[in-house]
Amino acid sequence: MFDLLLKNELSAPKKVKFKNEIFARVQGRNLKDLNDEIDFYKTELLPYFIKLSQQNPVFSVTEQLRLLVGVWTPIWSTISFHESLPKRIQEQSFQIFQQDGYCGSVARYIMGKEPDSSQNFQSTLPAYDFMLIQKYEVQNGRWYLHNIDRFQAFKNREIPLTLESVYNWFTNKVNTKVKVNAPKLDLTKVQKLENLEANHANELNKTSLVTSQVFEHLYIDNDLRLVKTQTDASHLPSYTIAVRR
């Protein structure tokens, strides 16, 4: 498989075929152990990442902006932030990129779905919505992400988190909180996450307090992004597959 991918140029139909194969391989994966996902990337996804990166239609980061702006969903990732809490609802996960340089990662988690919980008790538990707001920019030809602020909400789990509701929440917080407090905000001093179990809150705190990271689009087109993310050169990179909403 590796030889086949590395030798052949991709025609448009082959590119579509490869993209569909990536989707099929990650569909329905129960993301639990990060090390398992890293191994899965090395053994199953790496050849597709290599070949599609060689066929990246837009290499210039400044030209990638027109494709980046919009709303995406991460369908698979080795970034621990995406799975810091259990029971993330993939179809209710969003990445929003605005033209003004603000972006947000929003996800819904259905808490309390342990096997020994009764159905009646589960149905009364709220959904937990978490949003990390960031700034993105280009420096010396590279994309950078800077964590700015984070917000949480407990909502009726029977009412889905929709693209419209997420965008309204994101734009409201950016306009009324983030831009107002930007000159004096220190993410490390942001109010602690509340009403979460200690181990979950600690994990989410740890992963969302990383203040800056560089990311690279190994591949980007109108509906697919293969992203490599790294906090610094001493850390192993993470990989994400995102599709446009």
Image: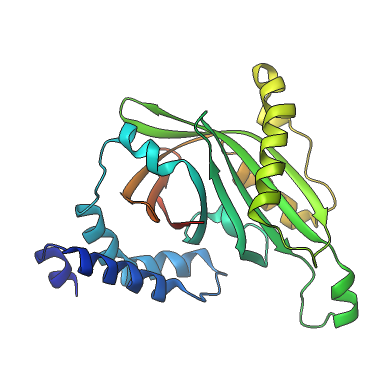
Q: How many marks?
A: 0
Residue at image position (71%, 50%) is: 165
Toward the left, the furthest residue is 7
Give the percent coordinates (x, y) of residue 21: 33, 74
Q: Is residue 199 left or right of residue 77?
A: right
Residue toward you, 202 or 133: 133
Residue 243 left/right relative to 93? left
Is 205 left or right of 198, judged from the image as shown?
left
Front position in the image: 206 or 83: 83
Q: Quadrant of the N terminus?
A: bottom left
Residue 145 screen position, x and y as percent: 49, 35
**Residue in view at x 83 percent, y 47 percent:** 194
Q: Is residue 118 above or below residue 229?
A: below
Residue at figure coordinates x 12%, y 62% from the top left: 9
Residue 78 left/right relative to 52: right
Who's the residue at 18% across and 70% down the image?
2
Check the image and name the residue furthest to the top.
183
Task: Measuring from the top left, give residue 125's x and y in whole percent.
Answer: 86, 67
- Indicate the position of residue 176 as horizontal and vertical percent values: 74, 28
Instruction: Indicate how the structure is coloured in the image.
Output: rainbow
From this view, report whether residue 64 is shown above or below residue 92: above
Q: Please, is residue 205 above or below residue 113 in the view?
A: above
